[in-house]
Image (tube, rainbow, N blue to C red):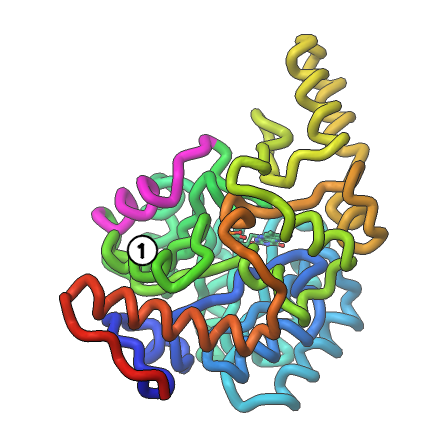
Amino acid sequence: MSEGAFGFPSRLPGLLGIRYPILQGGMSWASSSAALPLAVARAGGLGVIAAGPMRTEALIAAIREVKAGTEAPFAVNVPLYNKRSAEFLDIVEAERVPVLICSQGGPKAHLPRFRAYGAKWLHVVASEAHAIKAEAAGVDGLIVVGGDAGGHPAPDEVSAMVLVRAVARKVAIPVIAAGGIADGAGIAAVFALGAEGAQLGTRFLMTREATVHEAYKQRVLEAGIADTTLVGRGGLPVRQIRNRFSAEVDAAERAGQPKEALDALYASRSLKLAAFDGDVDWGKVEAGQSAGLIGEILPAAEVMKRLVAEAEATRRRLLGLPEQAAA
Ligand SMILES: Cc1cc2nc3c(=O)[nH]c(=O)nc-3n(C[C@H](O)[C@H](O)[C@H](O)COP(=O)(O)O)c2cc1C
């Protein structure tokens, strides 16, 4: 097929200045450096630096490294509940980062100063109500995360298939679907639901550039589609690969332990333990159900190339068009 053909209509390339409406999900640790976002930006997608666990100097350095490596736009992901979110926002503004992706908090108070230098604001939502509220606040687009996603999925566990459709029916701004998308067929599927872009987390976790421990990548690679579970139901749950830690949480829940004990248990282990220290038995090995659809670790540029080609091949199949010869 011809290099880069992508026949799905989307306002995102025009809005954000990217070539393809494909986003690499901001992933704490995995994209908390320049490597993965830079590779994705160079390949025509939106690369996203996850500020969450970063020291401020490291965030500044990563932003500058991406800028030095490409003319293409990129984003920084700031969870607004993070106690350092104000510092992160100041850095994003000072560095004139072109796209800001925020979650877990209201955008309204922050929007004007980013608008002032022309930044675009994409807001991460996991319910219809938050989607409507964020649109009313004036954000440029919504990243709609379903219950199948890795990291923090929709707490009420509504799948992307249902939530993306519900939100697309209700809002006028571009919707980007997240959760359970691993290949071009998944991208084509969310366009059918009314999305204008796809955000993939777990797929980009399985790249050479993702900065997590090799043991983490291997554990995700070996996982099947039913090997993840939600840990921390009733609060801000994470979807992770089942391991000794998740089994301990399950047992505590079944035993009817009080909420304080469950909260303490949940907080006793971290993503860092798995992603940085490589303890995949006791750390939170965050990944989505789509882990079971991914069979290899590739360079991010190769992932981007395949996603674009697969999406286009799917579109042609659905339209009954002949396959295109390889370029
Ligand atoms: C290891 C990991 C860490 C994540 N960290 C963040 C984060 O810091 N901020 C955020 O908004 N989303 C985070 N996410 C969610 C992703 O950005 C994305 O929405 C999600 O992975 C999409 O679902 P998928 O994994 O099924 O593709 C994380 C996901 C994973 C797998």
Q: Quadrant of residue 158?
A: top left
Q: Quadrant of residue 7?
A: bottom left
For image coordinates 37% across by 74% down, the residue present is: 309
- Percent from the top left, x then y, of residue 259? 68, 17
- Percent from the top left, x then y, of residue 3? 37, 87
Q: Which residues are magenta?
A: 156-169
99 relative position to 140: left or right: right
- The verdict on residue 165 being magenta is yes
For image coordinates 27% across by 71% down, the residue present is: 10
- Percent from the top left, x then y, of residue 127? 39, 40
Q: Is residue 57 visible?
A: yes
- In the rendered image, the quadrant that contains the C terminus is bottom left
Classified by dominant secondary structure, the portion drawn in magenta counts as: helix
- In the rendered image, the quadrant that contains the N terminus is bottom left
Secondary structure of the residue carrying tag 1 is: helix
Q: Is residue 245 above or below residue 30?
A: above
Q: Is residue 104 visible?
A: no
Give the amino acid type for the residue marked by disc 1 in the picture: Val
- The verdict on residue 271 being magenta is no
Q: Residue furthest top?
A: 256
